[in-house]
């Protein structure tokens, strides 16, 4: 090695943030292995790289002992004191044994170590950057598709969009620019692995934060999200400012804000409802766009019994129960929906049933008295 190589290491310290001492120590450790491999030595050796000149020195090491069992690694006290009378048992005696042609091997080994350390440092920087962005949105370009797994180029690295995290029926093509939600960042031997999602409710939340300034500024707050990715979602919002309508802020002028999010999610329908501390009102709001006549709560079983107009029953339940299902997820309440006529019919049946039971009891009592 030479001074140019040493200068290159110093530059790396500044540009890559890798401490020069760490590099030198790694190079010296690698050189010990290279020395033993190339020269078939079983000696204990220490290798020193001069931090200024790049000169390399190899020193064999022997331990001073009473009785020598391995001449390659040990020396007797008597022989040691012939070299220097001050040596004592347990001391280490070093002798320079640098091979003449070791420079070429050393330079090649050092280069490999430096390249490896640079790669590790870069991976570390990427990992730290993205691990701090977990639960955030990242924009990337579809790089390739292998089987059903989509790999997305994020610039410095790539992300993995697994089949389970893909929106049903959404097509991905090489070169497509898409937004995804960072689920997890893992450390692997090949560098950081970034797992992303297009289905997570967090993606919807982040999109609203990006699109609606009032949410970003904290004026409008998102309380709950229920999502069936690719089909429909519900989001409950409130305002910390009486002058700001939370639903209107999220919808935006002429519906532009919410439409931008719908477009990003390839047509996924989004219901924006007003959050309410009163569970009855919240359940009623969550069943939007259906109208609600009444809501009765069973606190112990966490069940909300909802009555809607006859002509609104199918709308309240939704296709395959989707509207009611999303409303339940959004509010945290199980929701039992009935129409007015169903409730009236049940009430009539209940009334008739009660009358019959009373009459039967009366007749029974009369019969008992007559007996």
Image (spheres, grey):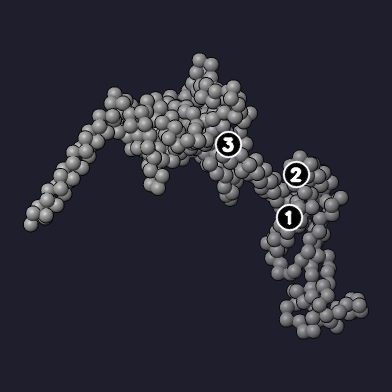
Secondary structure state at the residue bearing disc 3: loop
Q: Which one is nearer the viewer's eye here, 9 or 226?
A: 226
Residues 58 and 239: in front is 239
Q: Which residue is mark 1?
A: 26
The residue identified by callout 3 is 136
Residue 240 occupies quadrant:
top right
Name the residue located 41 percent from the left edge and 44 percent from the top edge.
299
Give SS at disc 2: loop
On residue 17, the disc is 2
Tell me: 36 left or right of 131: right
In the drawing, does residue 256 fall left or right of residue 127? left
How far separated are the C-alphas under marks 2 and 1?
15 Å
Disc 1 and disc 3: Cα gap in Å? 36 Å
Asked if 173 appears above or below 70 in the picture, the reply is above
Question: Residue 370 at what x, y percent from top left?
Answer: 8, 54
Q: Residue at x 50, y 15 (%)?
A: 254
Badge 1, how many Cα within 10 Å: few under 14, some, many 20+?
some
Looking at the image, is mark 3 or mark 2 earlier in the sequence?
A: 2
Say which residue appears at 49% left-offset and 21% top-offset.
Answer: 259
């Amino acid at each position: 090695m030479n001074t140019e190589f040493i200068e290159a290491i110093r530059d790396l310290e500044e540009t890559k943030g890798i401490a020069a001492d760490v590099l030198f120590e790694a190079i010296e450790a690698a050189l010990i292995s290279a020395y033993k491999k190339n020269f078939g030595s079983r000696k204990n050796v220490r290798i020193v790289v001069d931090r200024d000149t790049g000169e390399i020195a190899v020193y064999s090491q022997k331990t001073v002992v009473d009785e020598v069992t391995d001449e390659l690694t040990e020396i007797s006290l008597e022989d040691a004191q012939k070299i220097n009378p001050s040596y004592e048992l347990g001391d280490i005696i070093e002798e320079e044994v640098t091979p003449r042609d070791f420079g070429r091997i050393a330079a090649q080994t050092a280069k490999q170590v430096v390249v490896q350390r640079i790669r590790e440092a870069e991976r570390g920087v990427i990992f730290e950057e993205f691990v701090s962005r977990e639960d955030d949105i990242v924009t990337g370009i579809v790089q390739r598709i292998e089987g059903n797994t989509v790999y997305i180029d994020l610039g410095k690295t790539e992300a993995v969009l697994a089949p389970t995290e893909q929106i049903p029926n959404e097509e991905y093509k090489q070169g497509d620019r898409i937004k995804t939600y960072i689920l997890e960042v893992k450390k692997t031997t090949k560098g950081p692995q970034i797992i992303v999602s297009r289905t997570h409710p967090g993606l919807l939340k982040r999109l609203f934060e990006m699109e609606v300034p009032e949410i970003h500024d904290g004026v409008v707050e998102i309380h709950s999200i229920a999502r069936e990715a690719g089909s429909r979602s519900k989001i409950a919002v409130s305002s910390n400012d009486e002058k700001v309508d939370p639903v209107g802020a999220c919808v935006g002028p002429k519906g532009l804000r919410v439409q931008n999010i719908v477009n990003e999610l390839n047509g996924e329908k989004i219901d924006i409802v007003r959050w309410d501390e009163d569970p009855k009102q919240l359940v009623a709001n969550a069943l939007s766009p259906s109208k609600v006549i009444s809501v009765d709560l069973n606190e112990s079983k966490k069940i909300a019994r909802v009555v809607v107009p006859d002509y609104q029953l199918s709308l309240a339940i939704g296709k395959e129960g989707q509207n009611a299902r999303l409303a339940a997820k959004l509010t945290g309440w199980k929701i039992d929906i009935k129409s007015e006529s169903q409730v009236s019919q049940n009430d009539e049946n209940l009334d008739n049933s009660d009358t019959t039971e009373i009459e039967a009891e009366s007749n029974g009592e009369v019969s008992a008295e007559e007996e």
